Amino acid sequence: MFLSQLQLSDGSRAVAVRDADTAHLVPGVTTTLELAQAAIAAGHGLRAEIGARGAGDPVDLGAALADGRMLLPVDHPDPAHLHLTGTGLTHLGSASTRNSMHKKADPDDLTDSMKMFRMGLEGGRPANGQIGVQPEWFWKGNGHNAVAPGAALTSPGFALDAGEEPEIAGIYLIAADGRPVRLGFALANEFSDHVTERGNYLWLAHSKLRPASFGPEMLLGDLPAHVEGTSRVIRDGRAIWEKPFLSGEANMSHSLANLEHHHFKYPLFRQPGDLHVHFFGTATLSFADGITVQPGDQFEIASDAFGLPLRNGLTQQPHDTAPVAVAAL
């Protein structure tokens, strides 16, 4: 079952649910946040809440996507209360690309990236009831950096690269009692600046402060243990790069429970009413294959397990060489 948000032809917002090829509106709500809050208040899950509301009008999600009317599968009326975060070096193939970016002169001297990856292999999947090693963690911003499916990812003028990262994101709401509640999972493009990161791995934090997109649909229920998908860079209607990507716990060095614990262990991230979109990492980048993207290119991330594909164009802000001036009061 998939959940999504869209704009109807009259400009109003709606929530849609899809089972197999049949999609219909969810009556009585206009946002996923409203629906999730109602489910928590009723003491049951999203599926039960959707079922209790019955089926609304049928809707053509493919047409909505083609028309640019698909919204993020979840958003917040105050974007500052939606947090975009992620973890890296979590996938079994992710270390080689990162290691090549951060390589040291002595091949026998492990990079910090390889040390972090090895820590995950050895301690990222603890036994039930135990806490494993903490992963690499980063912040991408808040809801102001969240870009709807179909909309453009805009690279800042000072950026040195504008590369896609095909990932799975977990989507969470913090309940009134401070309890994190997972709403579902979505395809995601954790858009990053890999040239800046390669310059010095301590610039990773800078390289991640970029927009990101996720959706169009949110998968309800558990994440499949093995996820297969395809990531593409399309230029002038033709794929100039295409590669499969893998995700799911069968392809990860950390368990989802461990990644979730090390994010939500901070009280800061358990504030009632906040939404969290947490990117779980990837091992597949066009940058690693020597691709340099350019404005006008389109990113496509697709997986049958997640419904409609995620597509975003690329635009570039003009470079402003003047420093940002801060005025004193």
Image (tube, grey):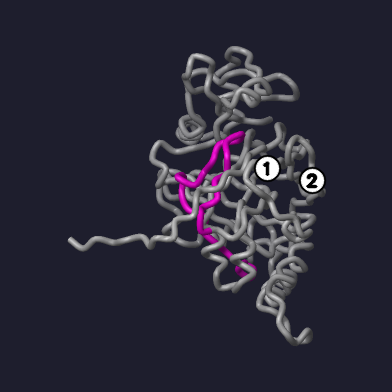
Q: Position of residue 69 (x, y in %)?
A: 57, 25
117 relative to 235, above or below: below
Q: Is residue 37 left or right of residue 293?
A: left
Residue lying at the far top of the rendered structure: 57
Q: Is residue 14 magenta?
A: no
Q: Secondary structure at mark 2?
A: strand
Q: Is residue 142 magenta?
A: yes
**Relative depth, front residue between 208 and 49:** 208
**CA–CA distance in space, label 1 to label 2:** 10 Å
Residue in the picture at 31% in, 61% down: 325
Of the 4 image quadrants, the one containing the C terminus is bottom left
**Relative depth, front residue between 160 and 122:** 160
Q: Which residues are magenta?
A: 131-158
Is residue 174 among the parts visible in the rendering? no
Is residue 156 among the parts visible in the rendering? yes
Q: Is residue 28 left or right of residue 94?
A: left
Identified by mark 1, the residue type is: Asp
Q: What numbered label is drawn on residue 240?
A: 2
Mark 1 — residue?
297
Of the 4 image quadrants, the one containing the N terminus is top right
Residue in the picture at 65% in, 22% down: 61
Q: Is residue 118 left or right of residue 71?
A: right
Q: Residues within 10 Å of mark 1 (few under 14, many from 20)?
A: many
Of callouts 1 and 2, which one flags the residue occurring earlier in the amino acid sequence? Answer: 2
Identified by mark 2, the residue type is: Ile
Residue lying at the far left of the rendered structure: 329
